[in-house]
Image: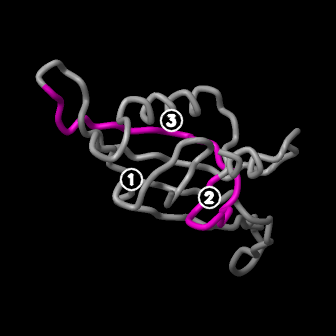
Amino acid sequence: MYCMLGKIAFEPIDLTEFSETFAVQFAEHEVLKGKPRLQAMGENLTEISVAIRLHHKIGGVEHRYKSLLKAQADQEPLALIWGSNKHKGNFVITSIGSNTQFTDAKGNVLCREMTISLKEFVGNESESLLGAALNI
């Protein structure tokens, strides 16, 4: 397993792009004369964008696709794990874009390209998401 989001596993060949955005906020206070002053207001939540290609030779395309859509609809935080149990944090899926690349003669999707946007989840969880993901 190269990467796991909740219970959904991805292999290195599945991931085609990965980007993270870290930001902070500042309040801007106007002054009578001169430039405004900035006041640090804290960190923003981390945002991650992942591009993946689900292919029938690597794993169930529709099963993983439907699992991602369900996770987004449930709006539940998911543990994001890279490689050898490197926990990147807990994230919710904020958007999913999908493009069918090719199908078989019966219309079954054999390859699907997707972009998934994640936002860091910080809060009180009733149970450890990391423990649930690592037990799979």
Above or below, comparing residue 108 to residue 58 in the picture: above
Name the residue that disc number 2 marks.
81
**Dot 1 alpha-carbon crowd within 10 angstroms: few under 14, some 14 to 19, many 20 or more:** some
Name the residue that disc number 1 marks.
51
Residue 80, located in which quarter of the rendered image? bottom right
Local secondary structure at mark 2: strand
Q: Is residue 2 magenta?
A: no
Q: Residue furthest bottom?
A: 34
Lower sequence index among marks 2 and 3: 3
Tell how many labels.
3
Residue 44, located in which quarter of the rendered image? bottom right
Q: Amino acid at mark 1?
A: Ala
Return the mark for residue 97: none
Name the residue that disc number 3 marks.
68
Q: Position of residue 4 (x, y in %)?
A: 56, 52
Q: Amino acid at mark 3?
A: Leu
Local secondary structure at mark 1: strand
Q: Position of residue 35 (x, y in %)?
A: 69, 79
Q: Position of residue 24 (x, y in %)?
A: 69, 67
Q: Residue furthest left?
A: 105
- Mark 2 vs mark 3, CA separation in Å: 15 Å
Above or below, comparing residue 67 to residue 29 in the picture: above
CB of mark 3 within 8 Å of CB of mark 1? no
Lower sequence index among marks 3 and 1: 1
Name the residue located 74 percent from the left edge and 52 percent from the top edge: 130
Name the residue located 25 percent from the left edge and 30 percent from the top edge: 109
Q: Which stretch did the figure color magenta?
A: 80-104
Task: Assign the C terminus to one quadrant of the image.
Answer: top right
Above or below, comparing residue 27 to residue 61 in the picture: below
Name the residue located 88 percent from the left edge and 39 percent from the top edge: 126
Local secondary structure at mark 3: helix
